[in-house]
Amino acid sequence: MKQLGKASVENIKNDLVNLAKYNSTPENGITRVLFYDEELQARDFIKARMAENGMTVREDAAGNIFGTIEGSEPDAAPVWTGSHIDTVLNAGMFDGTAGVIGGMEALRLIRESGLSHKRNIEVIVYTSEEPTRFGLGCLGSRAMAGELTAADMEEIKDQDGLSFAEVLQNLGHDLNDLQAVKRKKGDVYAAVELHIEQGAILDTKNIGIGIITTISAPTDIKVSVSGTQEHAGATPMEVRKDAMCAAAEIMLGLEGLARNAGDYSTVATVGKVEVFPGSTNVIPGRVDFSIDIRSADMEDKNTLVQKLKAIVKCVEAVRGVCVDLEIVTHDEPADADPRIISLIETACRQSGQSYHLMVSGAYHDSMFVSKFAPFGMIFVPSKNGISHHADEWTDFADIAKGTDILAETLLQLSQE
Ligand code: GLV
Ligand code: MN
Ligand code: MN
């Protein structure tokens, strides 16, 4: 009788270890920034592995990579899996990559089982899930959802002033083809993403699989505080308009709002600060910083943003500074499809795998895929919950277990 084999821990380990070699910071974790040399080489590595695994490979105008195995009705809406291979600075080797390599292994299992499936199954490497280069995450999946137009691509720039559109064109992509990147409801039958948890719930509870109910969504805000640049020795405290102290007050106010928000998933982070002119003996005249707010509850997030604006007004009035807030994204949390959740639960039960239903605090490309297709997500444990850090770790055997659940779920969906 034909049946699905088990994922190979060796295959998964080899591919992940080889992928991790494409790294611009070997002295401190892994850094692979969109369309820099290491990331381009990693893309070639993935495409070669897809082809070796019997997939047909293509790339769309936004740089999303697709590896496809054909079903018996290739015109039927396909089933998708996949994740990303770009990283934050000094990252670990599993964020995103576990879902790409696990996805390729799942497709290998399905193809080698000889089991028939009606729908094509595709593993996708979404372009730049991380905001590292252009300050905006989920570029590829956002474009698929129609929420990143050619005009937006002209607007977002990297630290060298190059726009995403320019970078794509320099690599030979034709922005006239962007229409074909966009998907509408019905184009994709279902999507299932495998990912590391990036939190400590599964590891702490010793549970093998997390099944996502909702993905928390980010609101990213750029803040610029303008005060008065003056002499640090000769300016009395009462006449200062210190942009740094004003920024600090806003940051602590934001922290208080997130701590006191009703919803456990509501969090806020200031991860990037630039102080001008940045000298020890000069009162800062300007401070620019980033705000990253997340919540699984859109109402909660809206309330927090309103309260933040009130704090900013107050700081402006009391300290005589000017604060400019630019909302870069205000994304909506995405609910996983109940039927896909139940298929994943069934796959776990049938294989005796412990599982836990949970909210994803991190965002994922599935958040944008949800705009045009029902989705599900499978999490595997992160050691001590560490992620976006060089010490990020997930056992290869745990990724293999997640891959088995993924393969079973993809097969079921592709047979419908
Ligand atoms: C994705 O990496 C996120 O920041 O949640
Ligand atoms: Mn990440
Ligand atoms: Mn990720």
Image (tube, helix red, strand yellow):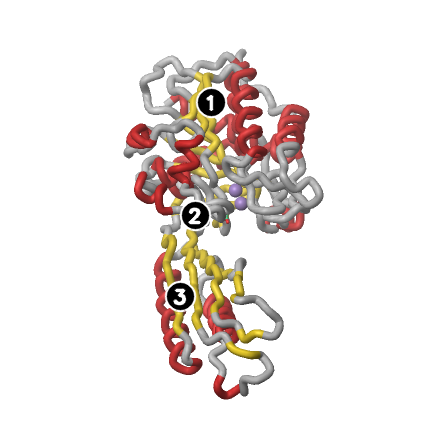
Report which quarter residue 10 is drawn in. Answer: top right
Determine the residue located farthest toward the right in the rendered image: 27
State the separation of the CA atoms marked 1 and 2: 25 Å
Front-most of 332 and 350?
332
State the separation of the CA atoms marked 1 and 3: 41 Å
- Quarter of the picture containing the N terminus is top right
Task: Please give the name of the residue rendered at 35% of the width and 35% of the height, measured from the top-left corner.
Answer: 144
Find out if the beta carbon at label 2 lies less than 8 Å from the nearest ligand 1 atom.
no
Viewer can see residue 337: no
How many marks the image carries: the answer is 3
Front-most of 25 and 377?
25
CA neighbours of label 3 inside 10 A, class few (<14), some (14 to 19), many (20+): many
As helix, strand or loop, the secondary structure at mark 2 comes to loop
User: Residue beneath label 1, please?
Assistant: 67
As helix, strand or loop, the secondary structure at mark 3 comes to helix
Mark 2 or mark 1, which is nearer the start of the sequence? 1
- Residue flagged by tag 1: what amino acid is it? Gly
Q: Where is residue 145 in the image (x, y as percent from the top left)?
A: 33, 38
Q: Where is residue 148 in the image (x, y as percent from the top left)?
A: 34, 42
Q: Residue 278 carries which label?
A: none
User: Which one is closest to the eye, mark 1 or mark 2?
Assistant: 2
Q: Which mark is residue 136?
A: 2
Mark 3 or mark 1, which is nearer the start of the sequence? 1
Q: Position of residue 315 (x, y in %)?
A: 42, 77
CA neighbours of label 2 inside 10 A, class few (<14), some (14 to 19), many (20+): some
Task: Please give the name of the residue rendered at 47% of the width and 41% of the height, measured from the top-left corner.
Answer: 129
User: Residue beneath label 3, please?
Assistant: 304
State the separation of the CA atoms marked 2 and 3: 21 Å
- Quarter of the picture containing the C terminus is top left
Task: Check the image and report above or below for 228 versus 276.
Answer: below
